[in-house]
Image (cartoon, rainbow, N blue to C red):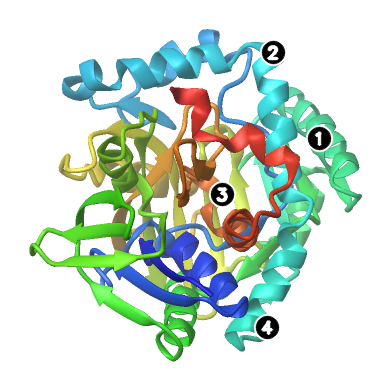
Amino acid sequence: MAHIGIVGGGIIGCATALHLLDRGHQVTVIERDAGGLPASVGNAGLLGIPGINPIAHPGMLLAAPKWLLDPLGPLTVRWRDLPSLMPWLTRLLLASRPAQVERSRQALTFLMQTAAADHGAMAKMAGITGHIRKTGALKIFDTETARDRAFASAVENARLLGGFAVEKLDATEARRRVPALQGNFAGAVFNEGYQTFEYPLTFLRRLQASIRERAAFIDAAVSSIAWSDQGISVRTEAQNTHLFDKVVVAAGVWSKPLVERVGLHVLLETERGYNTTFVNPRVSLEMPVFFEEHGFVATPFENMLRVGGAVELAKPDASANYARAAAMRKKMRRYVPDLPEEGGTEWMGRRPSTPDSVPVIGLHPGDPRIAFAFGHGHLGLTFSATTGRHVADLFAGQASPELDAFSIRRFQ
């Protein structure tokens, strides 16, 4: 068995570590902020099985100008970062062509078809139970036209993914199921395919604790990766060098400079998301509620409510703009008037995103001792267990042919 180093201790790195440990490998995880709050802990806490539609779509060219003119809308760009973002944005527009959208959907469907089962298997590896609830989710819309279009898309996705209930609801029925929705809206879609995790920070810490019992966990930022006949060396910013038989790069948005250190290129940028988490809120939701036309979701956890989403394209180290979190709360009060105006904790995280919404999962084209697992965008939690399984298969020489769509070769 090999000694495998994993650069990144977020949800993808942890899932990969568990699969490699389960196959008998020696594992060392190196995480730049082991006690911190990476993108893995700020998500909506959903197993988003229905979410196989890429961000890019044919109507993007018409919709993007309207979004970008609203600094607090569902999509914005830090204009001072625009020059460095242009290659990614250009590829995003190319990814909105119908043929590419269909290729991306097929790739995401391939991962999604086993996501629920893979999470069940990973939970057994970690000794975790009771961490996922079958809640479904409600998506509300301001117009019946938007609701009907979303319903048709959801029905098609359910068909591709093996079938789960999708219902088109009027506003009265939506309020019956979620009484807190007292504001005006035209209708809703209930989708049984969504499941809700326990509080994301709790889930990540449980995975990390299971790994620490069987593997080394180093708190350090990695500055470079290099290969030699002796193995793959990982150097930290503290100038310490660790030698491994194999290495997995699963460092989220911080994977980009490491990829460049091993002679490759990748279009990976920070899709920054914001949220507000309320503890013991006075408003309760019976299930997650997507405010679909505004780009955010509210998820109820035990004694907590999280309101978050939206997309802000900016450099990873750009300062946070928490007005975006406030804008989501303000918009939510149109529909849920009892949402508190004060008392929530704001957060900003960095989703690592590719322009085609397809993550990078594969081996280095020139050295099969290095694997990549990053770029999952909004679906990191959902795809984590599946990604970990595929990385373990890659190192075992058992890769599925469908993984070619996820290769880093498409960016070279």
| Pair 4/1: label in front | 4
Amino acid identity at mark 3: Leu
* Residue located beneath label 1 in the image: 151
Is 40 above or below relative to 263?
below
Q: Quadrant of the N terminus?
A: bottom right
In front: 377, or 166? Answer: 377
What's the CA distance linking mark 3 and mark 4?
A: 21 Å
Number of residues whose C-alpha sits closer than 10 Å to that of mark 3, classed few (under 14), some (14–19) or many (20 or more): many
Foreground mark, 1 or 3, reads 3
Q: Amino acid at mark 4?
A: Lys
Classify residue 278 as left or right of residue 104. left
Cα distance in 3D space between marks 2 and 4: 40 Å
Instruction: Please provide percent x and percent y for residue 213.
Output: 43, 91
Amino acid type at mark 2: Pro
Q: Residue at x 68, y 83 (%)?
A: 124
Residue that mark 4 sits on: 124
Secondary element type, mark 3: helix
Q: Which residue is mark 3?
A: 379
